[in-house]
Amino acid sequence: MTAQCRLLNQPPAFGSFVRAEWNDGESGRRKSLIAIVYWVTTTAAEAGRRPAPYGLTLEELKREQPQIFELLVTEFTALHLGTIIENAPGYALPPQPPPVHAFVYSCTSEEVRLFTESPRFLRTTLQSIPNLSSEQLTAAAIRHANAAHAKESEYLVKVGRELARQLHDDAPRLQAILELLTGSDSTHFGSEF
Amino acid sequence: MAGTGEMRPIGVIIGGSLSEGLQMKVSDQVSVEDLRAGRFMVVEGEKYRFFCLLTDVVLETSDRRFMLFPPATGDTLARQVLQGTGAYAIATLRPTLMRSNGAPAEFDAGSLLPVKTIMPHFCAVYPANPDDVAQVFGKKDDQRFYHIGSPLEMEETPLCLNMERFIERSSGVFGKSGTGKTFLTRIILCGLIQSQQISSLIFDMHNEYGFRGTTEERNRSGGVRGLKQFFPDRVKVYSLDPESSKNRRVTPDAIVRIPIKDVTVEDIMLLAGELNLGGTALETCIQLENRLGENWLADFLEKESDDIVDLSRQNVGHQGALNALQRKLRSFEHRCSDFLKREVAKQESGIIEELFSDLNHGKHVVLEFGRHRDPLQYMLVANILTRKIHERYREETEKAMEGDQPGPRPLVIVIEEAHKFLSPELSDQTIFGTIAREMRKYHVTLMVVDQRPSGIDDEILSQIGTRAVCLLDDERDVNAVLQGTPSSSGLRAVLAGLESKQQALIFGHAMPMPIVIRSRTYDDENFRKAFHLEAPEERKQRLDKEISSDYG
């Protein structure tokens, strides 16, 4: 799903979990979809136009050409992972996507914890998406999930073992992800995770 | 199944065959370091419980690239993540017996079936529980069974030896020196004595069985109790060296003296290596025996040089050869002069009858060699006495067969350094070879204790029913003890994994399946209690109490 951010240049983090919510028109039931952010872009709000470079810094632009920011929007695309229905995570995709204009929220830490309790969410993040490193996406997803499981010391190992099962025949990919989770890469983003 | 409910499986069967053994993927919850070769395992099949022995463990990876680019030493996450997933262990199990799930819980030899099939994929594997051990090996409170030790990793579970079956065939205790052969033999002998079904004659080369044995444990300076102390009424100690007994302040029940006329050419042949005698010398001995009769050795030793010339004229042998032979035999007589006598006092001459009577009355006789530990002396005495006893047993058995009566009480003869008697060159000539071959026909079997089984004739080894093998290093020795056993390649790995003390692989006639045991500790408190023997302190306390109650 693709969603437009409320504020320019303030998208949810790469690999973070988001939730779309809407009311089903027929049954009237509240529906939700959990997805993971993998693509963020800021473009002209109007189709066909392209932002052109002015050769000025962001601060200078804000001072001299404030109107141009009104012409830009930030959008993100998220990969559908599953649902949380009545506090129970599900990993099957819903029959319909969220309707246009449905609201998309960042998942709360509690929601992330609930949804990532089972490492099954990794099966979707490992699939290949054009122009995207699924290893990066998976590692980012695990980082977010691990932050929500901060109280469980063994969480990373549990998830890692599921990864090792999924990637049993692809040692380099597994190792690439594990490397992103340990060492300097894991602390690079500071308190964000 | 009894007892396994609370146990976690240590793996699942993922493949394998009847001939090559089963492949078990080790559970990621289990450390591969806990899986020792020789461990007793159970696979829960759909219809049968399969009793198996762990014979090998292999490290595998799901992707070869894990091996090419292993995680860094400090990378604990990668190690934890890969353990049991991308990098895992496969254990090979050798199924040895199976038992129907519906069989009653008690020990029943009939319910143990040879393995003729294997279980389907993904059956769970558990470490054996005490009930499994009792179902396969019997319970220690059953008279037929004797608690000999415990299976590996199951220190509290008694593992029993079926004594009835054990005494049906000859047996062997093997292992390089210092691995606990003697201790294990003592433990088995205690079982034999306790079972009251058989007598034993123990040729005790190093004075270790009768009164007080030695131990390599440093904190037990006094040594360990001998069989006589455990069973004062049932064990008799004969001595070849009363002087040594006196020094050790023990009183033997009888002194053994051997009349020189009992030495036959066969004995000399046995000692040919020790005496450095060639084939011609032995032929000369036969000539001498033919010419001089029963007392040939004494007669020949007394011959003066003129007599030798006479003998050579009578074509007994070349004069020089006769002289050399006489010199060697004189030196032999000298080496054995303490017990080998031209004249034997009357009270000492009936030693064979006394020995036979003791044995036939269920006594266990330990023959101590005292200071006469020279292999030559040991071999000579063991061979002569065994031959004589065997003759008596044969007579009695034949007599009993004619009269349709039960024969003499079965006897087991315990010899150390057995390879010296049973080497391929000698086994045809010595009485021990004969006994090993003719099996129980005359109610006499052997228990050989040896550190060099490769030196024993193959044919004799194949007649050894139950084998207890402590650690052996030499490839040839390992081959020799495993010869003729099915699945010897698996057992080889098990044997190589034995610890150097108190562990033995036992297999053969008396054991339903091969098993590694940790033997009981001989002469510790539990052992003494099992044989109703009080520790000195306890005895003192009891006596003090009795005295104070009588006089206090």
Image (cartoon, coloured by chain):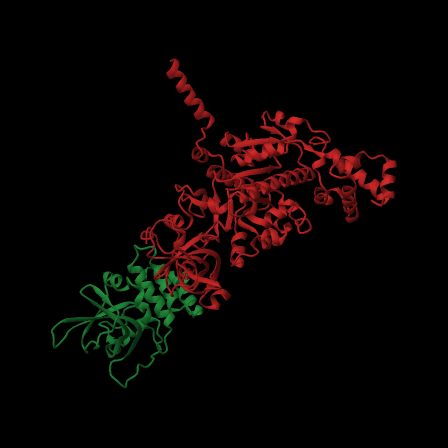
Residue drawn 82% across the image and 35% down it = B303
Residue A166, position in %: x, y?
37, 68
The residue furthest bottom is A48
Of residues B437 and B310, the one nearer the viewer is: B310
Q: How many marks?
A: 0
The green-tinted chain is A
Decide if residue B469 is in sight here: no
Residue drawn 62% across the image and 45% down it = B418
Of residues B514 and B138, the one nearer the viewer is: B138
The image quadrant that residue B540 belongs to is top left
Residue B98, position in %: x, y?
40, 57
The red-tinted chain is B
The residue furthest top is B551
Residue B310, position in %: x, y?
87, 40
In the picture, measured across the screen, residue A127 lies left or right of residue A110, that is: right
Task: Please say if B263 is above or below B112.
Answer: above
In the picture, measured across the screen, residue B303 lies left or right of residue A182, that is: right
Decide if residue B399 is in sight here: yes
In the picture, measured across the screen, residue B109 lies left or right of residue B179, that is: left
Residue B498, position in %: x, y?
52, 49
